[in-house]
Amino acid sequence: MERVCKFIKEAQTYYLATVEGDQPRVRPFGTIHIFEGKLYIQTGKSKDVAKQLMANGKAEICAFKGGEWLRVAGTLVEDDRREARQSMLDAYPNLQSMYSADDGNTMVLYFKDATATFSSFAGAPKTVTF
């Protein structure tokens, strides 16, 4: 999981795929964080992405850097604890101008039953689970 988080942070942007009914939805994200041994992302509860994840938590992220890419597939589960929200905001101080741990909008979610696959054009994929 540490390697996954490091790769995504170095890539800076990853793309989160969700579903809305039978329509895939993909958008860029930038927050990734390990808290209490779980890999977390952050969004706002008022956003469509949050509504999509509440209806169907299955999601996948993809990041690319230096000729390699990483896909992480699993179920995103909301962690509604203040400590989890604050940990994410502490890791990303620039978010604190838009979000706070107690604003009722900040949402953090962690990957459950995740499979991460590292790939490149040069070699065979490598998979880890967490």
Image (tube, grey):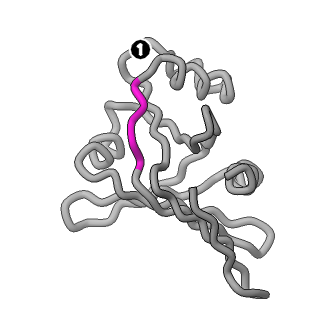
| Numbered range of the magenta stretch | 76-80
Magenta stretch: dominant SS? strand
In this rendering, the answer to whether 45 lies above or below 53 is above
Left or right, 89 with respect to 19, comes to right
The answer to whether residue 32 is left or right of residue 53 is right
Q: Residue 111 at x, y = what percent?
A: 49, 49
Mark count: 1
Asked if residue 67 is positioned above or below residue 108 in the image, the reply reads below
In the figure, residue 18 lies in which quadrant?
bottom left
Residue 39 in the figure: left or right of residue 6:
left
Q: Quadrant of the C terminus?
A: bottom right
Residue visible at 39% across and 25% down?
A: 80
* Camera-nearest residue between 27 and 121: 121
Residue situated furthest left in the rendering: 21
Residue 49's x, y, as percent? 35, 46
Q: Is residue 50 magenta?
A: no
Say few, some or many: other residues with alpha carbon within 10 Å of mark 1 (under 14 / 14 to 19 / 20 or more).
few
Residue at 33% over, 51% down: 57
Identified by mark 1, the residue type is: Asp
Residue shown at the point (44%, 25%) measured from the top left? 106
**Residue 73 in the image: x percent, y percent?**
48, 63
Q: Which residue carries the number 1 mark?
A: 103
Vertical side of 12 occupied by 73: above or below = below
- Residue at 45 percent of width and 50 percent of height: 112
